[in-house]
Image (tube, rainbow, N blue to C red):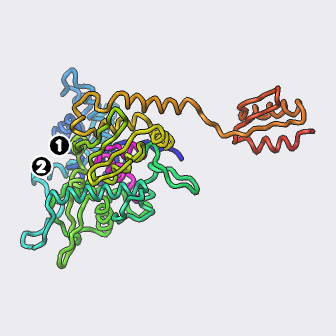
Amino acid sequence: MPQVRIVAKNFMDMVAALPAMKLDKLYESAFICEAVLRSLPPMAKRYVLQMLYIDSPVTAKSMEEWLLPDGFSKHKVAIDRLLQLRVFVEVNDRKKETSYKINPKFQSNIQKHLVDGGTIPREPMASNIVVRLPTIEDLETYASQQWECFLLQLINSSQAEKLTSFSSSMIKVFQRGLLSSRENETPKLTENGFQFLLMDTNAQLWYIIREYISTAEDRGVDPTDLISFLLELSFHTLGQAYNLNTLTDVQRSAIKDLAGLGLVKLQQGRKESWFVPTKLATNLSLSFTDSSSNKEGFVVVETNFRLYAYSTSKLYCEILRLFSRIEYQLPNLIVGAITKESLYNAFENGITAEQIISFLQQNAHPRVAQKIPTVPENVTDQIRLWETDRNRVETTPSYLYEDFPSKDVFEAACDFARELGGLLYEDFKNLRLIVRIEVHQEMRDFLRRAPR
């Protein structure tokens, strides 16, 4: 199965990849325009604001005059980003001089936003409606539990409790590139899958959101509508309740899927239904550096290769099980050991020594996180040595041929295998021949035709 490189991209990278017509359609929404403006590099924001009330194109040469001597590299980054997002449209005049103009739809919406102060996406629940809403702490706990449950289901763990609303077909879409499966074998986590589990929650969320949007057309949904709604959702207020009746059919279907991911919590009132955004939803339009959470570590590794994980998370237990031997689990403590056998199983599944070491370092318990090194050197060195030891010998599926009737037939078989590029070993003294498994059928046919 081809490997899919896990890349942590934010929403604006997905927006920038859209065709020009779909981008222009997105800019009909004031929320999209504001989200795009927020995401721009500082110099790009400055250019937008400077040119916001200029209707005629501004030449590239004129813009370069605004720069200090050391600002050209940042200027180039800003212009490239503005062109990618079609915030700037390139104009060439008769003199073949390059000029830039702000996208009219984007310009109009940002002007209205500055004058009117912006508008809220939809009205939250009125204060006279009596419904017990979850607290911010309740929402944090809900989002964390829902996301963990989803990840457990994603990696096909027997420990997973199926609390998410995703169908098996959607789960398979999300598993693409994370799990490899062969006939009559249980799916295995790929190297990219383990890399995914090591990511920050926001980076994992972006991977899943990207897969969700990329398959929207298969479900009969326009990806532009989905991107527009997701960005709009980030402008809702954390912890406020919003009426489901204000949503379109597409948005109502999406909100149920987002509840499965923990982005929103669905709330049933006496007469009407509501959705309450969690922090995962309100962070959607932010960059990773703005939204990434500093999670407290939980792992302690000792010089004797013993491992103690102070966590109640089933997910963390499953991750540790990928490269260590879990000996017993208490309500808030997982005890295990890093062994040669457990690491060989991890290497067999495509997990690398550096990924394991990185995981142990990133998730080091606060008591050891301040130490240098956070993971004992004898442990990290041994993990690397075991990986090197395993990689010293490479196995190649092959076939052995012997008992040839004559040297002439043997030599002809060697020449034939060499031409096919499948010859691995030849022994003229004992008339033995080893070939790659891929050329076995051709060799059999050749030897059947060979004279005795």
Q: Nearer the viewer, mark 1 or mark 2?
A: 2
Nearer to the camera, 415 or 346: 346
For badge 2, the amino acid type reads Leu
Q: Residue at x 31, y 69 (%)?
A: 249
Instruction: Give x and y (percent) for residue 111.
Output: 15, 49
Residue 74, how many percent across, how many down? 25, 29
Above or below, 292 relative to 276: above
**Distance between the alpha carbons at the discs numbered 1 and 2:** 10 Å
Q: Quadrant of residue 383?
A: top left
Q: Toward which corner of the image does residue 428 lie, by quadrant?
A: top right
Tell me which secondary structure the magenta stretch mostly adopts: helix
Answer left or right for 136 relative to 151. left
Residue 435 visible in this rendered orientation of the protein: yes
Q: Quadrant of the C terminus?
A: top right
| Residue 85 visible in the displayed image | no
Check disc 1: other Cα within 10 Å, few if <14, some if 14-19, many if 20+: some
- The image position of residue 424, as x and y in percent, is 71, 32
- The verdict on residue 226 being magenta is no
| Farthest residue, direction right | 452
Which range of residues does the magenta coloring cover?
A: 193-216
The residue at which mark 2 appears reads as 114
Mark 1–mark 2 contact, CB under 8 Å? yes
* Residue shown at the point (26%, 27%) measured from the top left: 372
| Disc 2 element | helix
Residue at the spot 89% in from the left edge and 36% down from the top edge = 405
User: Does residue 92 lie above or below 293 as drawn?
Assistant: above
Residue that badge 1 annotates: 52
Q: Nearer the viewer, residue 199 or 245?
A: 199
Amino acid type, residue under disc 1 in the picture: Leu
Check if residue 210 falls in the magenta segment: yes
